[in-house]
Image (cartoon, grey):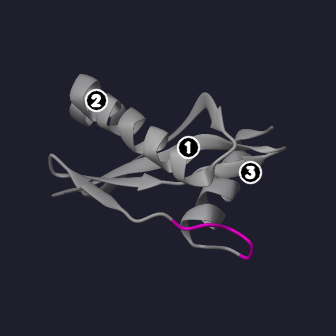
Amino acid sequence: MKLKAVIGKLAGASAGGKGQHSAETVEYKGYRIIPAPYRSGDQYQVAGAIEKTTSEGVKRHDFIRADTSPIWEDAVAIATAKARQIIDQQGDRAFK
């Protein structure tokens, strides 16, 4: 799948597009985690975004992981955990 299509799916999922679930944003260590799993066949692909408001504006890091789940809520939980891991390991470097 092309990156542009994947980003489009992330945007549609986080905006609660037709037939899409919408997860709540989670605040963590000054960052916003936006879980956005999307349907891929009979599974949900773990994906989401990390945002942070800085003096330069809002910075955003979109991520997609190889993890999948047949249950949307589980994919949201995994995406949230993965985002926390990215924040803990990379902090602001995730935005480069």
Residue at 30% across, 37% down: 84
Task: Report if the CB atoms under discs 3 and 1 are less than 8 Å apart.
Answer: no
Q: CA distance from mark 3 to mark 1?
A: 10 Å
Q: Amino acid at mark 1?
A: Ala
Using residue 57 as the reference point, say whether residue 21 is left or right of it: right
Q: Of the residues tagged 2 and 1, which is closer to the observer?
A: 1
Q: Nearer the viewer, residue 58 or 86?
A: 86
Using residue 81 as the reference point, say whether residue 22 is left or right of it: right
Disc number placed over residue 39 in the picture, else none: 3
Disc number placed over residue 31 in the picture, else none: none
Q: Is residue 69 above or below residue 76?
A: above
Note whether residue 96 is visible: no
Q: Quadrant of residue 70?
A: top right
Residue that label 1 marks: 47
Circle 1: element type: strand
Position in image of residue 7 (x %, y %): 64, 51
Q: CA distance from mark 2 to mark 3?
A: 29 Å
Residue that label 2 marks: 93
Range of magenta residues: 18-22
Q: Mark 1 or mark 3, which is nearer the start of the sequence?
A: 3
